[in-house]
């Protein structure tokens, strides 16, 4: 499919003239190029993924950004952070300059997250704040992109109540940014271009990476798991893997540029390669190739326990530049709740996977994501989550109260758990997370760890900060020349969420003097 056919097919499948959208958007019809439809987003087509290398800035848009500045605020996960890097690349290719302040910007984008209601509320709050700026500067373009723009209800709400927004575009429309900006400048009406069905894979989009020490590398897009609580399969489309040779080349290139760490990204990285028709190739195969590249650290996120296979464990056990930290979201410790969540594993199967990982990689660190207060979760089921947490011995976790997402199966479930009970369970779980985290951190005291130095600490420019192989934050005194390098640090004090230490080389030098 070429670009024109792709656009036509998207418009044919997710056009405001389809029944649902017509009802929602008729009032704003002239403004809407393509509107989102969750129903459409749910469909999984059989057609092959097409790979494109033909992205370029159309002649007529070159220089569009001259004398103009852009500002992007990013919410949500690393995938969004990385999308922001791509959009920054497109802006700069159009001649725009970046700016750190909204007051200075000619274009402001909010790259949004839809995972929980409070993530969305933050964005609506920010849109409210930006109204004053837009009033002062009517030439300012204000755009909403990312996961929230894939939701019909959000687009409706913006159309109805946030008239100062100039453009809304979806996660599959990022490469269309030059066209969307052009449209917004010309029409001065709100421009909405959201394809509900995933696009193909476009390989040669420009990127401006944040920093030159650590880099994100997409290995796949989308998710086909449809956990009953989750909006991601709707906002990010079906699973599409990048070809291994493209990923390997990108990582090699990053290594040659001096990057010290790459994090491979995907909503469910363990499903990598499942969509290839011509080769049998999974995440284990990819990691086995990547580990041979001369780059000090390789990580990946996020894993789904269901697809975490033995070959991957075997490869990770080879160590080297493959980091000994695995983020393995469990969501619940109760088999019954897992079933309602459609996670497709039981408590026992998860524990068996953990056992295999620990047997193969004895010094592995595990972290997880947990949702409490799922519809109708009982006290006993919650207690099973608490006991699993202890049994696995996670070093830390991200914990959330279940948040209903419109269009997902869980949002339709009748829920008999009062919010107060959910809050109290979260508190109990967080107490356990803090207790185990503090215990895990305490063990580092007196140890010498390897730290990749990111830069100055956020709170104190006299202190450097970086991360261990297990992704623990370390603050320590050291020379600025250490930034971007991996140094040895002796841990002197453990806090709940970070470690303090002293750089070993510097200590030795001081002793010699
Ligand atoms: N409510 C609460 N938490 C959620 N997550 C995903 N969807 C929801 C939801 N509807 C959590 C899961 C996931 C993490 C990224 O966010 O724990 O792993
Ligand atoms: Fe949020 Fe998920 Fe979208 Fe990331 S992919 S921004 S976590 S909704």
Image (cartoon, helix red, strand yellow):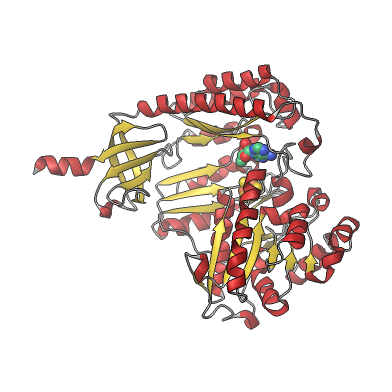
In percent of the image, x 51 and y 35: which residue is there? Answer: 326
Q: Relative to 392, is 380 on the left or the right?
A: right
Front residue (pair 117, 39): 117
**Image: 239 above or below 327:** below
In percent of the image, x 71 and y 41: which residue is there? Answer: 230
Q: Say which quarter of the image contains residue 229.
A: top right
Front residue (pair 179, 361): 179
In percent of the image, x 88 and y 61: which residue is there? Answer: 22
> Which of the four quarters of the rendered structure image does ligand 1 lie in?
top right
Q: Relative to 47, is 435 on the left or the right?
A: left
Front residue (pair 278, 3): 3
**Image: 457 above or below 387:** below
User: Residue 355: percent from the left, percent from the top?
Assistant: 54, 22
User: Residue 314: percent from the left, percent from the top?
Assistant: 52, 32
**Image: 423 above or below 42:** above
User: Residue 342: percent from the left, percent from the top?
Assistant: 74, 32
Of the 4 image quadrants, the one containing the N terminus is: bottom right
**Image: 305 above or below 62:** above
Q: Which residue is the extreme one toward the left? A: 513
Front residue (pair 118, 216): 118
Q: Total label count?
A: 0
In percent of the image, x 39 and y 47: which residue is there? Answer: 296
Q: Say which quarter of the image contains residue 354.
A: top right
Q: Relative to 100, is 106 on the left or the right?
A: right
User: Residue 73: percent from the left, percent from the top?
Assistant: 55, 59
Of the 4 image quadrants, the one containing the C terminus is: top left
Residue 280 can be seen, yes or no: no
Residue 221 can be seen, yes or no: yes
């Amino acid at each position: 499919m070429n670009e024109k056919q792709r656009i036509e097919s998207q418009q044919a499948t997710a056009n405001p003239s389809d029944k649902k959208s017509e009802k929602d958007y008729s009032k704003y019809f002239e403004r809407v190029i393509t509107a989102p439809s969750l129903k459409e987003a749910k469909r999984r087509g059989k057609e092959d993924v097409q790979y494109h290398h033909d992205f370029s800035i159309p002649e007529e848009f070159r220089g569009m950004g001259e004398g103009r500045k852009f500002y992007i605020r990013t919410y949500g996960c690393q995938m969004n952070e990385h999308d922001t890097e791509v959009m920054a690349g497109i802006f700069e290719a159009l001649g725009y300059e970046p700016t750190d302040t909204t007051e200075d910007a000619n274009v402001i984008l909010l790259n949004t997250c839809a995972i929980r209601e409070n993530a969305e509320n933050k964005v609506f709050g920010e849109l409210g704040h930006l109204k004053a700026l837009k009033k002062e500067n009517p030439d300012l373009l204000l755009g909403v992109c990312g996961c929230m723009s894939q939701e019909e209800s959000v687009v409706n709400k913006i159309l109805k109540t946030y008239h100062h927004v100039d453009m809304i575009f979806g996660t599959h429309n990022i490469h269309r940014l030059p066209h969307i900006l052009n449209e917004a400048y010309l029409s001065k009406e709100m421009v909405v271009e959201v394809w509900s069905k995933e696009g193909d894979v476009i390989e040669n989009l420009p990127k401006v990476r944040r920093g030159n020490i650590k880099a994100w590398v997409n290995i796949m897009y989308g998710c086909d798991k449809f956990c009953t609580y989750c909006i991601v399969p709707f906002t990010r489309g079906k699973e599409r893997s990048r070809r291994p040779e493209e990923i390997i080349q990108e990582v090699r290139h990053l290594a040659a540029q001096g990057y010290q760490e790459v994090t491979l990204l995907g909503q469910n990285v363990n499903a990598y390669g499942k969509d290839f028709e011509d080769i049998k190739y999974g995440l284990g195969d990819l990691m086995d190739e990547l580990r041979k590249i001369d780059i000090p650290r390789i990580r990946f996120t996020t894993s789904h326990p269901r697809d975490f296979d033995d070959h991957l464990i075997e490869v990770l056990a080879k160590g080297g530049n493959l980091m000994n930290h695995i983020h393995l979201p469990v969501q619940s410790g109760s088999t019954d709740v897992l079933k309602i969540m459609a996670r497709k594993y039981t408590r026992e199967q998860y524990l068996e996977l953990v056992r295999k990982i620990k047997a193969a990689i004895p010094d592995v660190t595990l972290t997880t994501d947990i949702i409490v207060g799922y519809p109708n979760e009982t006290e006993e089921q919650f207690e099973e989550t608490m006991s699993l947490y202890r049994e696995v011995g996670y070093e830390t976790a991200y914990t959330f109260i279940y948040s209903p997402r419109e269009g997902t199966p869980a949002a339709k479930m009748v829920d008999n758990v009062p919010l107060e009970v959910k809050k109290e369970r979260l508190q109990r779980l967080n107490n356990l997370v803090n207790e185990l985290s503090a215990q895990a951190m305490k063990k580092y005291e007196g140890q010498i760890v390897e730290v990749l130095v990111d830069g100055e600490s956020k709170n104190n420019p006299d202190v450097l900060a970086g991360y261990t192989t297990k992704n623990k934050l370390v603050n320590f005194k050291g020379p600025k020349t250490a930034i971007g390098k991996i140094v040895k640090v002796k841990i002197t004090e453990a806090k709940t969420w970070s470690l303090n230490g002293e750089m070993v080389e510097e200590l030795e030098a001081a002793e010699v003097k």
